[in-house]
Image (spheres, helix red, strand yellow):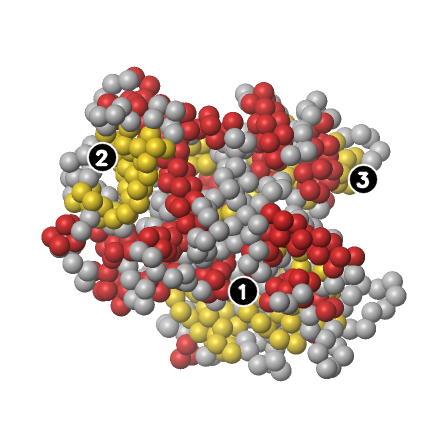
């Protein structure tokens, strides 16, 4: 057997991601506690030898010095391009590509404009390092674009003297794209378009591209929303062949298919969703058994029955990875024929589901569980407000099911927090829109008991499905590659800064263990609820957390305090859930495991698309906020400091929750510097400080709707 240190180096050498010791151990097929400790000890030795580097959040990566020197004697690194608006560019080595610092001997690599070649902002590139000079920053030259960050760009067409140029909206891309006439798709000067780069020779200053979509004239709601989608690499429509494939799927369920499934059509069943939802991918059934237990069915649309691997629909769904929820529209992962019709669990219609069924007692203890294919018929579609009214009044349609389910959900929620889950109450900004999509009001969506009812049962299904496949009951049980939803613990450096900050506010945040941290954090947030510092503390506590991702290497879910967790409950809108359905089906029918490397690639793609969807959603909110403030130039508002950067101070208006920036250049009454450990902008001479969460009075001075930017100024009382 290969020596352990060589196995660790091989794992890190073949990985494009930084890994923690449990993930490294899993890739070497080590799963027991003693073996993992041996991996950890060997990692410490490799760190001391500078072969392996710490990479934040208890993770590791191979020192690039040992990765690709080959026979040339040159030193290469792989990393992402980060261009500045000034024209400078840096390559961030792999392992430093999220927003957390790392302990590393390799700094960001400076790349002069002339050495950038045809690399674009965000591209994964290979850089050759120039010989180090004492006291100088590390410099290099891009020698290969390993992977483009974007498939498409958004901007406007300019035609001058018969030559068409595409000018990107993103000012970081400092090259216009030449569009040959045959590739214009009838676009005219001033049109906002989506462009794909076709060719960019290393000796040419400008790339060659083609227009793939003409969006229209800048400024209209539809054009700007479509631009936001395209910026995040989401298509604005389905290919015609995919639409036709979806519409050709028979709507009638064959009788033989119903006969091979467990039939829940005579059991009380309902859905609870937002009032404006069009796709209903989960339903609950409820019945009281003769032994006094409650049988709860969590029924999820059986998308895997309709969407088969190798089809055009499946390829398009994988490419998208997720549905995207903009302020005024949903861009579904699946064509409407599936998402809103065939797969949607509409009332009074027979529907095919993949279900998790549990027999529970009054303490929500699971006495029996079953996973499999079912057919259901929903009795009623509730929105959250209707279900909430039943919970609050104790009366209403199907109250005999909703009320006991609510009690069980309360028990599970309490047990979850007692078991060290972290209590986050995130704010969701919503807009009241007129018939033209223009915002006429802004409000926060409030989470209540009806939301928690659905949440707890979805968590139960996700947790138990992950345990069913991932939890080994004996040493002889085979290991199955599976898709997990994991959430790592906070980075120690961020956690330390946060702990010191809240200590000055009178809170003793315990960080000696997961249990101590979650208990003290929850207690702090609970004590501050309704007080001025609550929003600030809640937002900062979220910012110190890691980002949840999909992976085949299970490390558990830190925030939920679940050792096993996956996404099973939303296959209409999330591709990982569809993968989980297929894998669960495969393993329940005793088929062999799938290829781990292949599924890890799938997981990484889905995590990337999830991040891009979140970016698009945030950009649509920013656009509507800018649109809402556009006619309020010169007006004053109460706000709170919501962020501090070297560019300026961000402020969020209390009433409308719109966020804008007070440029740093406007702070001209003193010399100011940023105290990162106290989240504060400090005036050096006069003691004028601005801390995250501080109240501030601002005036709206400029709004750029197209760039989704709002500029404020301080109002000095």
Residue shown at the point (15%, 50%) measured from the top left: 258
Q: Secondary structure at mark 2?
A: strand
Q: Secondary structure at mark 1?
A: loop
Measure the C-alpha gap from mark 3 to mark 1. Answer: 39 Å
- Residue 382 can be seen, yes or no: no
Q: Which mark sits nearer the N-terminus, 2 or 3? A: 2
Residue 182 spot, x, y in % from top left:
40, 80
Residue 271 spot, x, y in % from top left:
27, 36
Question: Residues at badges 3 and 1 in contact (C-beta under 8 Å)?
Answer: no
Query: Camera-side residue: 138 or 707?
Result: 138
Q: Which residue is mark 1?
A: 149
Query: Camera-side residue: 228 or 263?
Result: 263
Res 671 label: 3
- Please give left or right for residue 296 compared with residue 689 in the image: left
Residue shown at the point (18%, 62%) measured from the top left: 248
Tell which tag, 1 or 2, sits nearer the viewer. 2
Tell which tag, 2 or 3, sits nearer the viewer. 2
Residue 321 spot, x, y in % from top left:
41, 57
Residue shown at the point (67%, 29%) measured from the top left: 509
Q: Which mark sits nearer the N-terminus, 3 or 1? A: 1
- Residue 319 can be seen, yes or no: yes
Q: Is residue 405 above or below residue 478?
A: above
Res 181 label: none
Q: Secondary structure at mark 3?
A: loop
Residue neighbourhood size for the residue with mark 2, other residues' Cα within 10 Å, grouped as few (<14), some (14–19), many (≥20): many
Task: Place residue 298 in its image quadrant.
Answer: top left
The C terminus - image quarter? top right
Outermost residue on the left side: it is: 255
């Amino acid at each position: 057997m290969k020596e352990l240190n060589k196995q660790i180096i091989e794992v890190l050498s073949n990985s494009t991601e930084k890994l923690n010791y449990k993930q490294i151990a899993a890739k070497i097929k080590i799963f027991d506690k003693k073996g993992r400790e041996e991996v950890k000890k060997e990692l410490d030795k490799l760190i001391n030898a500078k072969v392996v580097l710490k990479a934040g959040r208890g993770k590791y990566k191979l020192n690039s010095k040992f990765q690709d020197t080959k026979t040339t004697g040159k030193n290469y690194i792989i990393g992402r391009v980060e261009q500045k608006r000034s024209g400078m560019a840096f390559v961030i080595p792999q392992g430093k590509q999220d927003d957390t610092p790392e302990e590393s001997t390799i700094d960001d690599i400076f790349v002069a404009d002339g050495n950038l070649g045809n690399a674009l902002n965000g591209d994964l590139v290979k850089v050759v390092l120039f010989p180090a000079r004492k006291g100088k920053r590390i410099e290099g030259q891009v020698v290969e674009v390993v992977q483009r960050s974007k498939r498409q760009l958004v901007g406007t067409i300019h035609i001058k003297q018969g030559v068409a140029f595409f000018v990107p909206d993103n000012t970081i891309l400092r090259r216009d794209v030449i569009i040959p006439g045959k590739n214009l798709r009838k676009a005219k000067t001033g049109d906002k378009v989506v462009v794909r780069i076709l060719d960019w020779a290393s000796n040419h200053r400008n790339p060659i591209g083609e227009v793939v979509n003409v969006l229209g004239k800048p400024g209209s709601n539809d054009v700007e929303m479509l631009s936001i989608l395209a910026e995040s690499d989401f298509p604005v429509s389905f290919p015609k062949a995919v639409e036709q494939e979806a519409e050709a799927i028979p709507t009638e369920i064959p009788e033989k298919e119903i006969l091979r499934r467990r039939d829940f059509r005579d059991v009380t069943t309902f859905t609870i969703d937002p009032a404006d939802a069009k796709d209903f991918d989960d339903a609950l059934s409820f019945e009281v058994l003769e032994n006094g237990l409650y049988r709860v069915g969590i029924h999820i649309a059986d998308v895997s029955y309709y969407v088969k691997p190798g089809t055009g629909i499946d390829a398009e769904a994988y490419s998208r990875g997720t549905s995207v929820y903009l302020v005024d529209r949903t861009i579904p992962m699946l064509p409407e024929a599936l998402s809103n019709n065939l797969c949607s669990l509409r009332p009074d219609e027979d529907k095919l589901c993949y279900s998790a069924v549990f027999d529970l007692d009054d303490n929500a203890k699971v006495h029996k569980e079953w996973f499999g294919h079912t057919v259901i018929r929903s009795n009623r579609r509730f929105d959250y407000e209707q279900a909430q009214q039943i919970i609050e009044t104790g009366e209403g349609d199907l109250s005999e099911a909703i009320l006991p389910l609510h009690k069980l959900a309360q028990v599970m929620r309490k047990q979850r927090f007692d078991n060290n889950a972290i209590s986050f109450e995130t704010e969701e900004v919503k807009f009241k829109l007129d018939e033209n999509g223009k915002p006429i009001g802004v409000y926060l969506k409030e989470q209540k008991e009806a939301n928690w009812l659905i949440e707890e049962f979805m968590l139960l299904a996700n947790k138990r499905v992950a345990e069913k496949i991932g939890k080994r009951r004996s040493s002889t049980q085979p290991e199955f590659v599976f898709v997990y939803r994991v959430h790592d613990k906070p980075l120690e450096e961020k956690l330390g800064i946060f702990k010191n900050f809240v200590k000055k506010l009178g809170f003793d945040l315990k960080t000696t263990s997961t249990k101590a941290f979650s208990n003290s954090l929850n207690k702090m947030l609970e004590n501050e609820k309704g007080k001025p510092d609550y929003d600030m503390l809640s937002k900062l506590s979220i910012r110190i957390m890691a980002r949840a991702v999909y992976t085949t290497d299970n490390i558990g879910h830190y925030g939920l305090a679940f050792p096993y967790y996956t996404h099973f409950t939303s296959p209409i809108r999330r591709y990982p859930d569809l993968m989980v359905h297929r894998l669960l089906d495969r393993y329940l029918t005793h088929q062999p495991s799938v290829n781990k490397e292949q599924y890890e690639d799938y997981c990484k793609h889905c995590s990337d698309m999830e991040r891009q969807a979140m970016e698009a959603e945030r950009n649509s909110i920013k656009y509507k906020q800018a649109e809402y403030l556009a006619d309020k130039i010169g007006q004053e508002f109460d706000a709170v400091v919501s962020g501090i950067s070297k560019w300026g101070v961000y402020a969020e208006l209390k009433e409308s929750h719109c966020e804008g920036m007070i440029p740093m250049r406007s702070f001209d009454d003193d010399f100011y510097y940023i105290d990162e450990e106290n989240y504060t902008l400090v005036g050096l001479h006069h003691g004028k400080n601005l801390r995250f969460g501080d109240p501030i009075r601002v005036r709206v001075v400029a709004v750029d709707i197209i760039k989704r930017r709002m500029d404020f100024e301080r109002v000095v009382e």
